[in-house]
Image (cartoon, rainbow, N blue to C red):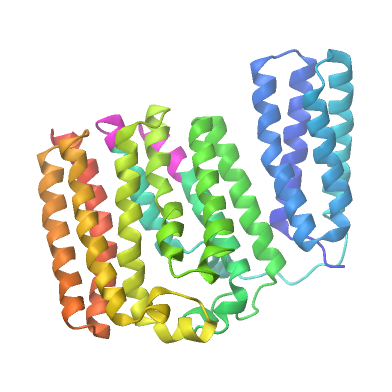
Amino acid sequence: MPRPGAWLRLTALFASGAVLLAVVSGAASLGAAHRVLAALALPPLVALVVAARLAHPRLLAPALGALLLFGLAALVTAPDVHLALSAVAFAATLVATAATYRGKDVPRAAWRDYVTLTKPRIMSLLLVTGLGAMFVGAKGAPSAWLAVVTMSGLALACGGASALNHVLDRDIDKLMGKRTRARPLAAERMPAARALEFGLTLSAFSFVLLASLVNVLTAVLALVGNLFYVLVYTRWLKRSTPQNIVIGGAAGAVPPLVGWAAVTGNLTLPALWLFLIVFFWTPPHFWALALLIRRDYEAARIPMLPVVRGVRETTRQIVLYAVVLVGVTVVPFFWGPLGVVYLYAALLLGGAFIWLALRLRRNATSRGAALLFHYSLLYLALLFVAMAVDPLLG
């Protein structure tokens, strides 16, 4: 049996350390600190169980046993029994950790392939939207420390979700042309188990980092976005409905909520407008790309809108969503925290977006689709930069 990779072993070691700290803090009667430390042990334990269930069956019994004992200890309130069960849970976690070091070693994947799994270009745009929302929520520049920690946690969540997306899409990636056939799993440069472990580790560490150094709401939002992208969009919607990207776009709209919650500790109406901006931006952005690689989606039997409804209907939907998008972008000025600097930017950038969409509608060429697709990336980045700049100049 192949041995789990370094990422899963790191997760197991972290779980053992976190459970040990929870036991020690409980024995010392540290109260709130004990509860926080116990909560931080849960994500790596869950990641260990999921990885065992999907890729390392022999690891499932010790990992699941450690998780169940840890949960049982949390439910028992009698001090002596709680402490005893916690100690047993720690011992079980050590057994699970030791099990990750057994088995035959497999060749290591190149670090470049691990970077590829995180989809850095997509991640960078998501981080821009999250950081822009931090400036809006703070009504100015947030503290450098908070910004760095929040963006680091968000990057881990985005990278983890992207890695798990690679795992689930490795079959269709082989069918969708050179762009996806060269990916690490499709090209078989890396075992799927390694990518799974990597994705679970990043996802678990994202929650731990955000929950411990920012706030629990921020950590939960990042996790929800991660799970929605992996389980709802990638696993279900992408292969079942031409509305996949419309509903699935909610996952990409979560980073502004993460940024807002990091500086405010809550979710109020202005945060919803930031969410909706990215939500309505996603379909025209992605459908422009889908027009360019329609034949690839046909080959993989993915029901993207251009495949199911045709080019003409797709360009019509792009125009409709572009108009709605621009309408939504002006709401934060009339009913929200943003001022005239942002409004001018939103109208100028949005006007160009609608013009390119109408141009594509009149003449649906590959060049027009490519121009709209690349502009849409610049559009969203500049729009959120304008959001960040507006409170600084107001």
Give the vertical position of 89 relative to 302 (above or below): above
Q: Quadrant of the N terminus?
A: bottom right
> Residue 185 vs residue 101: left or right?
left
Q: Residue at x 74, y 40 (%)?
A: 15
Can residue 68 be seen in this snapshot?
Answer: yes
| x 39%, y 82%: residue | 293
Q: Determine whether 73 is above or below 203 in the image.
A: above
Magenta highlight on residue 166 = no
Residue 60 location (% of width, % of height): 84, 53
Which residue is pictured at 47% across the width and 84% down the height? 298
Which of the 4 quarters of the picture holds residue 306?
A: bottom left
> In the drawing, does residue 330 fall left or right of residue 103?
left
* Residue 141 belongs to magenta span: yes
Q: Is residue 132 visible?
A: no
Q: Which residues are magenta?
A: 136-151
Q: Predominant secondary structure in magenta?
A: helix
Residue 335: percent from left, percent from top: 20, 35
For residue 366, side relative to residue 7 (left or right): left
